[in-house]
Amino acid sequence: MSLPPYLQPPAIPNASAFTRWGDHNHLAAVLDMATKVTFLTGAGLSAPSGIPTYRGTDGKWLTQDPITFGEFVRSEDKRLEQWRRTLKDYDSFGGAQPNKGHLAMAELARFKDVTVITQNVDGLHGETRPALPEGRLIELHGNGKRICCLGCGAKFPFDRPMVAASVEAGRTPECPKCDGDLMPDIVLFGANLDIDDISRARAAAEDCTVFVAVGTSLAVHPAADLVRTAVENGAVLVISVDTVTPYHHLAHLLLAGDATEHLANAFGLLSIS
C-alpha cells in the first residue's frame, strides 16, 4: 500500500524500502539492521494488559479535569482528590502484568543496544523478565507504583493500605522519614519533567539508528519532540499506533493494528532470536 502525498516520509538514503505501510515482517527487517534502537511507548502498549488509555474514547481526559502540581502543593482538598484518583488508578493497573510487547523489547535488549523511553506510569517496563539493562529505562512521567516526598525527596513503593487510611481520615499521607507531604511519583500537569530523564531521552533519540514509537498519539510534549530529534539525526522512524499522529509524514514504516503483536512477531523473525 502506497502512502498518500501528505504522509510521504522524508528522503533518507537507504531507507526507501521502509517508506510505506507495513507489518511485522517489515519491522523485523528494520530491527535486524539496527545497531541502536530507541523505543518511545505510550498507553496503547499497555492497553492489552488491561489498562485504560488516557486519551481513548473513554479516557480520563474526557471525564475529569486534571489537578495541577501547583494545586496539589497549595490545597489540601486538591491533594486528597488527587490521592483518591491515584488509588483508583493504582487499582486499575496495580495487578497488571507486562504483555508480549513489553517482553519483546526486553528480549531485544539482550542482543541489541536498546533504550526504552515511556510516557506510561504503570511501571510495567520495569517488571519484565528478563529485565531491561540498568539505566536503559526512562520513565518520563514517573511511576504510579511509587510515592515520593515533597519535603525530603525520598521515594517509596506504593503502600495502598497506608494511603487509603490517610485519605479516609481526611489527611494527606505523610513521609515516614520527615513527616512531609507525600505525592504519587508521577508528573502532574504543570510540573517539570526530571532534567536528567529528559536529557537522557534526548541523547537516546540523537544516538539511535532506529526510533520506534509504539502506542502513542505523539500529542504530548516534550516526549513527542524526540521523534523529530531522532529523524534529524538520521534514524529510521517506525510508528505503530491506531491513529494518525502529527509525525506520520516523517515515518519510514507505519504499522496499524495491535502493536504488541507486531513487536512479538517481529522479534520471532529476527536473526538473533
Image: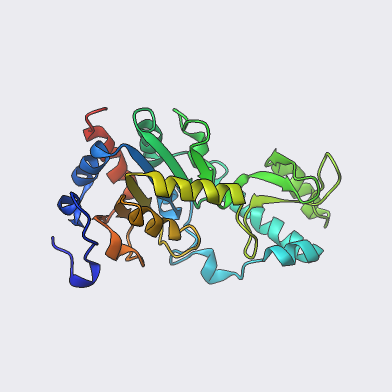
- Which residue is at the far right? 179
Say if 95 sits above or below 187 in the image.
Answer: above
* Residue nearest the viewer, comparing 2 with 84: 2
The number of discs equals: 0
Q: Residue at x 20, y 41 (%)?
A: 29
Query: Residue 216, relative to residue 219: is it above or below?
Result: above
Q: In the drawing, does residue 41 fall left or right of residue 169?
A: left
| Residue 39: image location, x then y, percent | 40, 46
Residue at 48 percent of width and 63 percent of height? 220
Expressed as whole percent of the image width and height from the top left, the position of residue 175 reads 81, 44
Q: Position of residue 171 (x, y in %)?
A: 83, 55
Residue at the spot 79% in from the left edge and 49% down from the top edge: 173
Vertically, is 106 above or below 40?
Answer: above
| Quadrant housing the N terminus | bottom left
Work out whether residue 224 can be spotted.
no
> Would you place residue 139 above or below residue 227 in this image?
above
Q: Quadrant of the C terminus?
A: top left
Q: How far across and how far down the image is residue 259, in percent?
A: 32, 49
